[in-house]
Amino acid sequence: MGRNTSIEDDLLAVARNWAGAIVANDAARMAEYVTDDWVIVSASGVSPGQHLLELVASGALTHDSMDVAGPTRVRVLGSTAILTARIITVAHYRGERSDADEWTTDVFVRRAGRWLCELTHYTVADTGGS
């Protein structure tokens, strides 16, 4: 199957800009990259993404860095796209530092000419340690 590198490049740019908004701790800018019903799936279950935006807006959650470790897998299926990457993050939740090495999958949908994240799933990366 052929790749649509133009669309893939657009999606990678959206992901970079969204990560920039996260590291800037700018909840309003972060919200520009997600749907109104964006959800986050993790080991603790399914959570409304709005909750994360509220934590960032309040200052309870801040991010110092968010780096992609290795290539990002991009698949475009019409007006839906899936991005998977290993992300290394340094954040603070209520003043406590949190270092995370996670595999993240984001499902984007195209609405009104823009790619918006509908679902984020993350799982802790196996770093080979105990």
Image (cartoon, helix red, strand yellow):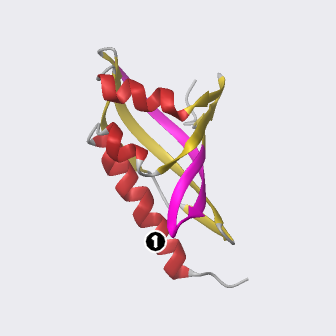
Mark 1 Cα shell of 10 Å, populated few (<14), some (14-19), many (≥20) = few
**Corner quadrant of residue 81:** bottom right
The image quadrant where one finds the C terminus is top right
Taking the magenta stretch, the answer to whether it contains residue 108 is yes
Eyeballing the image, is 66 above or below 43? below
Badge 1 is on which residue? 10
Write down the region rendered in magenta.
97-119
Residue at 37% over, 49% down: 19
The foreground one among 103 and 19 is: 19
Residue at 51% over, 70% down: 113
The foreground one among 79 and 74 is: 79
The kind of secondary structure element at disc 1 is helix
- Taken as a whole, is the magenta stretch helix, strand or loop? strand
Residue 7 visible to an observer of this rendering: yes
- Residue 105 lies, in percent from the top left, at 60, 49
Relative placement, left or right, of 77 versus 107 is right
Eyeballing the image, is 57 above or below 86? above
Relative placement, left or right, of 115 versus 17 is right
Residue at 29% over, 39% down: 26
Taking the magenta stretch, the answer to whether it contains residue 33 is no
Q: Amino acid at mark 1?
A: Asp
- Residue 106 lies, in percent from the top left, at 58, 50
Eyeballing the image, is 126 above or below 47? below
Relative placement, left or right, of 65 versus 41 is left
